[in-house]
Image: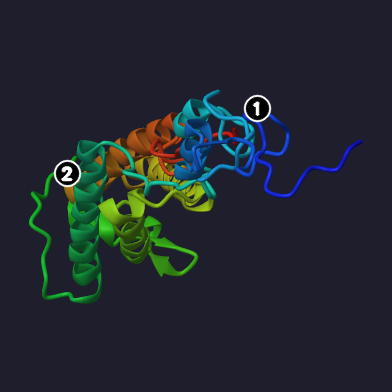
Amino acid sequence: MAARKPGATAKPGSGTQSRDKGTRGGRPEASTAASQRQGTAPGQRQGNGRAGNGRPAAARAAAPARAGPAEVAPSAGPPLWFQLTTWVLSIGGLGVSIYLTIAHYNSSVTLACPASSTINCEKVTTSAQSMVFGIPVAVLGLAFFVFLAVVNSPWAWRVTWPPLSWARVGSMVVGILFVLYLIYAEMFSIRAICLWCTSVHVITFILFVLIVFGATAGYGTAKASGTTKAPSRA
């Protein structure tokens, strides 16, 4: 090959052009400039709707964020009417039990009750059946309704703890059996009826029905309805 003479200029289109390949007139090509503006190197895949991790951008936007552990909303408990009914009945039974206990220990307090051959509160409250294992029945009733006034309060009903629910049911089973015994004693042993005692019996029976119904409905044992599940990871 003959050596090029000094001062000779290269012909247009020859391989010895002084400007860089991929430029036109010393300026970057349009595709190269657009790539630099978008922060991607020339030749990198673009325009296919995919992000840097290979997932479509639309799919990433629609995918839910990874959630932590499921959050459990506090239980609202049984209906408000149910909570208030059981609580008011428990407080009513507690009031009658306090009255009977005071009358038992204070002889100056006379029960407001008619005295007849059928209805005689004093005869019932002073009978041998008014004591069980050496403890006055009035005191046992007082302790029973103190417990019910606590566990049947609206605050206690909102607690989702199965042992507490079963304690309610168990106490009511014992209470209704004791009521049946007292009714039997009044009718066949004492042969007289105490109106105050009968009011306690009626309250106990109503509470028994309500609490057993509440247990079957899952009040105090079922999980809160506001429980939400964590979304699955995409």
Q: What is the x, y in percent for residue 126? A: 28, 62
Q: Is residue 222 visible?
A: no
- State how far apart marks 2 and 1 are (Cα): 129 Å
As displayed, is residue 96 above or below residue 199? below
Image colouring: rainbow
What is the secondary structure assignment of the residue under circle 1?
loop
As displayed, is residue 102 above or below residue 117? below
34 horizontally vs 20: left or right = left
Q: Nearer the viewer, residue 134 or 97?
A: 97
Q: Which mark is residue 13?
A: 1
The C terminus lies in which quarter of the figure? top right
Of marks 2 and 1, the one in the foreground: 1
Q: Nearer the viewer, residue 96 or 88?
A: 88
114 horizontally vs 47: left or right = left
Instruction: Determine the residue located farthest toward the right in the rendered image.
Output: 1
- Tell me the residue at 77%/45% (across/down): 5
Tag 2: residue type?
Ile
Q: Which mark is residue 119?
A: 2
Q: What is the x, y in percent for residue 158? A: 34, 49
The N terminus lies in which quarter of the figure? top right
| Label 2, residues with CA under 10 Å away: few <14, some 14-19, many ≥20 | some
Tag 1: residue type?
Gly
